[in-house]
């Protein structure tokens, strides 16, 4: 009888261990920022999903997006203008993605950094972009206005 009890104890201990690991995984929060403890999908705020920064270097502006895991930016939704005039961009080739809304598109994951020529005599640059979560949420187009330093 003690052999049976020992075997049952080991199995119960193993099952309890598995349950503890599962409970701690659920309690630790969302997985990749997409699921909450209740199983509902949650999404990062747009400024966390696409951490944007700009740095002026004389007549160039360096634009940088740090893109959270599970999120992407649309290549063809990135636009920059200065005083209402579109600035031509040299964007890298993106990753092809079949998007439910826009069909076959190119997107950027993880990090995007581009150099944009600017007219330093003007006071600001407007940057427009749009991104989505792989899990299905698309954010509305986002706009950033960057004040330029005087030459």
Image: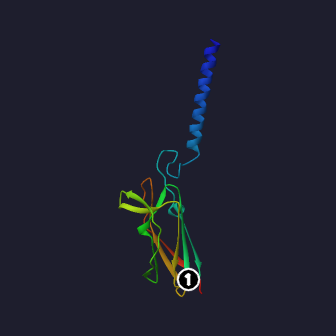
At 47% across and 50% down in the image, what residue appears?
41
Q: Element type at marker 1?
A: loop
Read off the residue under disc 1: 59
Q: Position of residue 56 (x, y in %)?
A: 58, 78
- Between 105 and 1, the one lying in front of the other is 105
Q: How many marks?
A: 1
Residue 106 placement, left or right of 55: left
Q: Position of residue 140 (x, y in %)?
A: 42, 65
Residue 107 placement, left or right of 69: left
From the viewer's perspective, is residue 45 above or below residue 129?
above
From the viewer's perspective, is residue 51 above or below residue 119?
above
Q: Position of residue 116 (x, y in %)?
A: 51, 77
**Quadrant location of the C terminus?**
bottom right
Q: Quadrant of residue 137?
A: bottom left
- Between 36 and 122, the one lying in front of the other is 122
At 58% across and 43% down in the image, what residue appears?
27
State the residue lying farthest toward the top: 1
At 59% across and 46% down in the image, what residue appears?
28
């Amino acid at each position: 009888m003690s052999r049976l009890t020992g075997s049952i104890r080991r199995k119960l201990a193993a099952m309890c261990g598995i349950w503890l690991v599962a409970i701690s995984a659920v309690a630790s929060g969302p997985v990749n920022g997409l699921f909450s403890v209740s199983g509902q999908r949650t999404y990062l705020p747009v400024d966390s999903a696409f951490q944007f920064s700009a740095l002026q270097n004389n007549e160039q502006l360096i634009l940088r997006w740090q893109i959270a895991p599970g999120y992407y930016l649309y290549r063809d939704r990135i636009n920059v203008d200065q005083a209402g005039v579109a600035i031509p961009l040299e964007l890298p080739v993106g990753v092809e993605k079949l998007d439910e809304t826009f069909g076959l598109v190119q997107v950027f994951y993880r990090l995007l950094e581009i150099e944009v020529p600017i007219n330093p005599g003007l006071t600001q640059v407007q940057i427009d972009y749009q991104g989505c979560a792989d899990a299905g949420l698309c954010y509305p187009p986002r706009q950033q206005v960057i004040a330029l330093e005087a030459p």
